[in-house]
Image: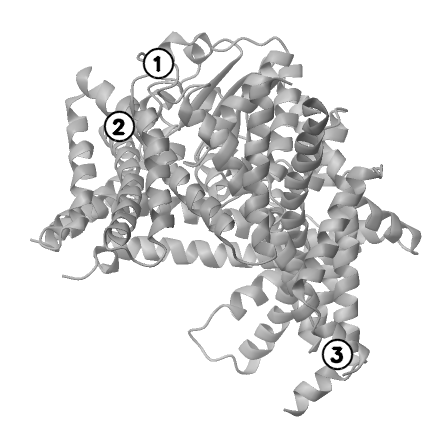
């Protein structure tokens, strides 16, 4: 029961969506598959909420037990509620509620959350520069290939570097775009895309047929 | 300890300081440089330019606020180009963190500059969960996946959506993404429904998408802030990306210099030999 | 610039500088900003999913007569069974539905939209070559694709022809990853430029308004 029912559900849902590819949208299988897609989107929304409940539980437990750094976890909890509660209240009560422009939710996102997320990722520029200085070494023929390509591409992709490359004999920017990016790079990326897609398709088949069950967890 | 060894053991914060100064400097003393146009950006521009006026297009905000510096100039430039051509623009996002808010803010701001009316000239469908379901579901019926727009107005109350049922009525999709959703626009929408797609993406993702351009699955490609600057130049409207090119140039030169110094220390300073001896 | 706009800019600048302060060393102000960020992001999900999924996609169509939507609603609720040790198994049904439907879509679209399309384009590049340079480029692409696929094929030991081809694959991959690294540097620097642009143009620019 605990395993068989989910396997049957995965099989039927998977087969319906595979068959839908070969049938017209107006057929029964077409309408059924569309209904399943709507359901998938709805259930997908709940999975995101599951993540938030999980974060809330973990932080609440840490605060309750006064674990190390509990104060900061309390800040996280307060932030969750400050953001979520006004968004859950109907905008008909006040223009500050709901999700529309000018609401608390909108304001907190635009002026606090978004700039912080942008900054978090901006710090990576410092780390990548430091890593390039400390670890980017021509230790072997292969790593030399990587290093030389990276350096030339870095030059090519900025106006100052491109101006410098233009001063050298031969049309280096054209060579880089045609033979490196659209030649060697493209071939490798295509190999990776094909390999990954074959892997995704075979894993999908294993899930539909009930061979792959690890997503169910233990028990 | 010789000079090279001391250089190798330099506190990483000196490197951070050098990067910081290189970024700030061009904003104090602006460096104006011409931006060359790559064939991929030109192809994208030509395709949009060739769209008949009043075409219906989708502008997809599939990026997080983390990459706003790279992606937002692309969406702004594309929205300007679309509105200039009187295209009818449908925006949406598959990103749960900020996507619909950014779509709303960018489109509304640009639309106001062109005197466009919400519901008639543009619509923001907002966000729905699970992009696989959303992309494949819109192939049959956009309304079944998005019963309302972002603010909760039913689609049948929006004049633009009267004539739009599914991808058959969409002439072009411009996908701006910082993640793998672009792959699914290719595998589900382009391959399954034949809608032409152009892609604007972060520099990190751009090398991968050359394969989609070569296969004709993307009609063109903008890669990173440089790609955005190219598009701004093509539509002849300078934006944030063009302004950032001076700083981008200086930091790239700094990092190349750091790599060279690091390798000189490794080889000339004998650091590599000592490590090898261990 | 209004007072509210200046306040907004100063709040954004404070949070930006608080996060950058980690570059010098870990500190309480950074931690504070980091935890506010985590909380606000989680809270954003709640507001968005509540409105766009639960209200717009589930509740309103349900009360308008689409009774079948009770099924995904129930499946969504079953997901929360994961928090109970005794009843965690009930969430498997919902999870199986998500995995099954996604797999059904993936199985076809990955093969049709990616594998076949990319293979077709590789072959077509050979057939449609125009001139010796173009043919050479097409040859590079075909060899590159095959060598890369073989390099990532781990079911057989890389010896003999397989080993030689995998070695060629490594050279191709190194060049591609080099290009990727160059682009990655570009991407990360662009993100920093975005923040510096804000600090200099908006924040420092607001000093004049205050004085």
Q: Residue under label 2, please give it.
A: C54
Q: Are marks 3 and 1 on the same chain?
A: no
Which residue has dot 3 on it?
Answer: B5
Left or right of A106 in this view: B147: left
Figure quadrant of residue A191: bottom right
Relative height, residue A146 to residue B127 (above, below): below
Place of residue A62 in the rendered image (x, y in percent of width and height, measured from the top left): 28, 53
Q: Residues within 10 Å of mark 3 (few under 14, many from 20)?
A: some
Q: Can residue B197 be seen in this view?
A: no
Q: Residue B81: x, y in percent?
A: 66, 21
Q: Which mark is residue A94?
A: 1
User: Do we see residue A76 in this rendering?
Assistant: yes
Q: Residue furthest left?
A: A1
Query: In the drawing, does residue B265 fall left or right of residue C45?
Result: right
Q: Do the residues labelled 2 and 3 touch (CB within 8 Å)?
A: no
Q: Which of B65 and B197 is in front in this view?
A: B65
**B65 or B137, which lies in front?**
B65
SS for callout 3: helix
The chain containing the residue under callout 2 comes to: C
Q: Which colour scheme is used?
A: one colour
Tell us which disc is closer to us: 2 or 3: 3
Q: Examine the rendered structure and indicate whether residue A36 appears above or below residue A177.
A: above
Q: What residue lies at 47% left-to-right and 26% top-to-bottom?
A: A107
Which of discs 1 and 2 lies nearer the camera? The answer is: 1
Secondary structure, mark 2, is helix
């Amino acid at each position: 029961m605990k395993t068989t029912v989910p396997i049957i559900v995965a099989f039927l849902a998977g087969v319906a969506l595979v068959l839908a590819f070969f049938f017209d949208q107006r057929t029964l299988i077409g309408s059924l598959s569309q209904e399943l897609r709507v359901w998938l989107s709805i259930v997908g929304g709940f999975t995101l909420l599951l993540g938030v409940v999980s974060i809330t539980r973990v932080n609440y437990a840490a605060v309750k037990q006064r674990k190390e750094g509990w104060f900061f976890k309390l800040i996280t909890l307060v932030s969750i509620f400050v953001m979520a509660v006004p968004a859950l209240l109907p905008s008909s009560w006040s223009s500050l509620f709901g999700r529309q422009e000018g609401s608390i939710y909108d304001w907190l996102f635009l002026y606090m959350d978004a700039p912080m997320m942008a900054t978090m990722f901006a710090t990576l520029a410092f780390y990548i520069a430091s890593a390039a200085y400390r670890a980017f070494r021509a230790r072997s023929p292969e790593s030399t290939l990587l290093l030389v390509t990276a350096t030339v591409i870095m030059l090519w992709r900025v106006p100052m570097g491109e101006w410098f490359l233009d001063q050298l004999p031969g049309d280096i920017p054209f060579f880089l775009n045609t033979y490196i990016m659209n030649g060697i790079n493209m071939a490798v990326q295509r190999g990776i895309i094909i390999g990954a897609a074959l892997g995704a398709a075979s894993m999908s088949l294993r899930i539909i047929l009930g061979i792959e069950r690890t997503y169910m967890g233990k028990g | 300890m010789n000079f090279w060894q001391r250089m190798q053991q330099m506190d990483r914060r000196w490197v951070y300081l050098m990067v910081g100064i290189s970024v700030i400097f061009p904003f104090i003393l602006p460096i104006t440089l011409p931006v060359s146009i790559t064939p991929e950006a030109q192809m994208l521009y030509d395709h949009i330019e060739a769209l008949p006026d009043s075409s219906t297009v989708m502008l997809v905000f599939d990026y997080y606020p983390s990459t706003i510096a790279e992606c937002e100039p692309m969406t702004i430039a594309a929205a300007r180009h679309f509105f200039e051509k009187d295209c009818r623009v449908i925006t949406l996002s598959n990103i749960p963190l900020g996507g619909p808010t950014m779509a709303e803010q960018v489109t509304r701001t640009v639309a106001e500059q062109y005197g466009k009316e919400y519901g008639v000239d543009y619509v923001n469908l907002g966000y729905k969960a699970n992009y696989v379901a959303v992309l494949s579901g819109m192939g049959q019926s956009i309304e079944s996946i998005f019963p309302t727009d972002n603010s909760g107005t039913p689609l049948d109350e929006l004049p633009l959506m009267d004539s739009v049922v599914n991808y058959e009525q969409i002439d072009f999709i411009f996908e701006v993404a910082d993640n793998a959703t672009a792959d699914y626009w290719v595998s589900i929408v382009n391959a399954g429904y034949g809608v032409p797609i152009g892609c604007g993406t972060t520099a990190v993702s751009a090398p991968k998408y050359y394969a989609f351009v070569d296969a004709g699955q993307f009609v063109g490609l903008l890669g990173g802030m440089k790609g955005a600057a190219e598009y701004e130049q093509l539509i002849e409207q300078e934006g944030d990306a063009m302004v950032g090119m001076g700083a981008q140039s200086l930091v790239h030169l700094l990092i190349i210099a750091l790599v060279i110094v690091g390798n000189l220390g490794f080889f000339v300073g004998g650091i590599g030999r000592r490590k090898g001896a261990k | 610039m209004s007072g509210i706009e200046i306040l907004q800019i100063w709040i954004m600048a404070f949070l930006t500088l608080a996060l950058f302060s980690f570059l010098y060393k870990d500190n309480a102000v950074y931690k504070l900003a980091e935890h506010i960020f985590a909380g606000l992001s989680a809270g954003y999900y709640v507001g968005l999913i509540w409105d766009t999924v639960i209200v717009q996609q589930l509740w309103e169509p349900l009360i308008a007569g689409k009774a079948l939507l009770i099924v995904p609603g129930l499946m969504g609720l079953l997901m929360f069974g994961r928090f109970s040790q005794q009843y965690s198994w009930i969430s498997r049904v919902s999870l199986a539905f998500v995995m099954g439907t996604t797999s059904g879509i993936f199985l076809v679209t990955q093969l049709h939209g990616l594998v076949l399309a990319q293979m077709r384009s590789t072959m077509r590049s050979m057939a449609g070559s125009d001139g010796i340079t173009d043919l050479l480029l097409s040859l590079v692409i075909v060899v590159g694709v095959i060598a890369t696929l073989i390099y990532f094929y781990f079911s057989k030991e890389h010896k003999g022809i397989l080993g030689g081809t995998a070695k060629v694959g490594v050279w191709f991959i190194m060049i591609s990853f080099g290009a990727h690294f160059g682009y990655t540097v570009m991407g990360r620097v662009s993100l920093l430029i975005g923040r510096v642009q804000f600090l200099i143009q908006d924040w420092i620019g607001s000093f004049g308004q205050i004085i």
